[in-house]
């Protein structure tokens, strides 16, 4: 049976999140008969599968070989002409699938992503994610073939194009989505839907910290201009135990940090030139961010003084 969309959700012990993800996917404005939901589970030992059974159309079990492998398996059994990949800790807006399907009326479009919010009310988290969204949009707008941004927690692609480019590179344990985006861009137009959105978990950012994540992401985009992104190990985040970052995270030499900072500055400058309104937006966010930090500092200082 041919469908318009196949939504593929890879899981591993996602009992805490999967219910919210699948409930949102099952209650879309797009008629349910137009799409299917496929769960690709790596033998979870919690209640992930039990929660999922009432929402999904197919469940397939695979060994734990990374997110790229799980997504590829889901794509092979998918009946939709458009593949939508979404992570278990990501919740879709009610009109997400309808907006995705509507975008593919243009035959030049091969895939893309949409606006993504953090599941946090912290001003700093929101500032970082708005910046990330704007840079994602900029990367997809640029004509450079070796730079693209389609985050794996929410991306979509025509199935025939996905098969033509060989799907996700299963040898990559990180940035497999970035690598897919580069190959997608060589086949056609990548779009960024800002009229719809998802909300995604920031648990990875909490575990590793923005000071390590941001330079790494910018560095990978930078070296991608010269070729394929480096194969970098990324520690698992589905654990309650603290991550010892120094033992699992690649150290970026000072020279690379300088290059990533320069790249970030150039991208931000281009973004502001393309949309002067963004300059005002960032000025306001910086103002409220500094105000928030000042308030937090004073509160912390006062508390410590009282305790003394």
Image: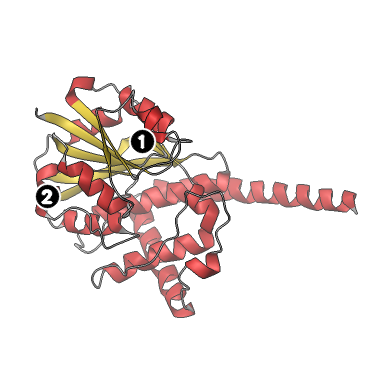
What percent of the width, then of the height, locates residue 51? Answer: 40, 28
Number of numbered discs visible in the structure rendering: 2
Left or right, residue 142 beside residue 286: left
Left or right, residue 257 beside residue 246: left
What residue did someone put label 1 on?
A: 197
Left or right, residue 231 beside residue 185: right
Which mark is on residue 263? none
Element class at badge 1:
strand
Q: Residue at x 54, y 52 (%)?
A: 206
The quarter of the rendered structure image containing the N terminus is top left
Q: Is residue 191 visible?
A: no
Nearest-to-viewer mark from 1 and 2: 2
Label 2 neighbour load within 10 Å: few <14, some 14-19, many 20+: few
What percent of the width, then of the height, locates residue 86? Answer: 32, 40
Give whichever of 49, 19 is nearer the camera: 49
Residues marked 1 and 2 touching at CB (< 8 Å)? no
Q: Residue at x 28, y 44 (%)?
A: 113
Tell me, what colour scheme is on the image?
secondary structure
- The residues bearing labels 1 and 2 have C-alpha atoms spaced at a distance of 26 Å
Looking at marks 1 and 2 on the same chain, the residue that comes earlier in the sequence is marked by 2
What percent of the width, then of the height, locates residue 235? Answer: 45, 60
The quarter of the displayed image where residue 115 is located: top left
Q: Residue at x 39, y 62 (%)?
A: 217
Element class at badge 2:
helix
96 versus 289 height, above or below: above
What residue did someone put label 2 on?
A: 163
Label 1 neighbour load within 10 Å: few <14, some 14-19, many 20+: many
The quarter of the displayed image where residue 39 is located: top left
78 versus 187 height, above or below: above
32 versus 250 height, above or below: above
Q: Is residue 300 visible?
A: yes
What percent of the width, then of the height, locates residue 88? Answer: 38, 39
């Amino acid at each position: 049976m041919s469908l318009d969309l196949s939504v593929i959700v890879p899981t591993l012990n996602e009992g805490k999140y999967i219910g919210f993800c699948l409930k949102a996917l099952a209650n879309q404005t797009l008629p349910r008969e137009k799409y299917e939901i496929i769960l690709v589970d790596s033998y979870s030992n919690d209640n992930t599968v039990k929660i999922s059974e009432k929402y999904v159309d197919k469940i397939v079990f695979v060994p734990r070989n990374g997110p790229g492998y799980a997504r590829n398996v889901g794509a092979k059994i998918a009946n939709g002409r458009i593949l939508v990949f979404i992570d278990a800790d990501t919740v879709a807006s009610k009109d997400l699938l309808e907006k995705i399907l509507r975008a593919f009326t243009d035959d030049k479009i091969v895939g893309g992503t949409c606006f993504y919010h953090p599941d946090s009310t912290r001003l700093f988290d929101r500032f970082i994610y708005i910046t990330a969204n704007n840079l994602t949009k900029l990367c997809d707008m640029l004509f450079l073939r070796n730079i693209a941004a389609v985050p794996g927690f929410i991306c979509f692609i025509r199935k025939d194009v996905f098969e033509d480019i060989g799907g996700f590179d299963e040898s990559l344990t990180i940035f497999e989505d970035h690598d897919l985006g580069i190959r997608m861009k060589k086949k056609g137009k990548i779009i960024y839907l800002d009229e719809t959105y998802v909300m995604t978990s920031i648990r990875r950012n909490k575990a590793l910290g923005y000071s390590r994540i941001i330079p790494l992401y910018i560095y990978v985009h930078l070296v991608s201009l010269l070729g394929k992104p480096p194969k970098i190990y990324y520690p698992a985040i589905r654990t309650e135990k603290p991550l010892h970052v120094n033992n699992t995270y690649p150290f970026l030499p000072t020279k690379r940090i300088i290059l990533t900072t320069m790249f970030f500055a150039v991208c931000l400058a281009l973004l502001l030139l393309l949309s002067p309104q963004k300059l005002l937006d960032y000025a306001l966010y910086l103002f409220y961010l500094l105000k928030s930090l000042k308030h937090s500092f004073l509160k912390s200082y006062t508390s410590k003084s009282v305790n003394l």
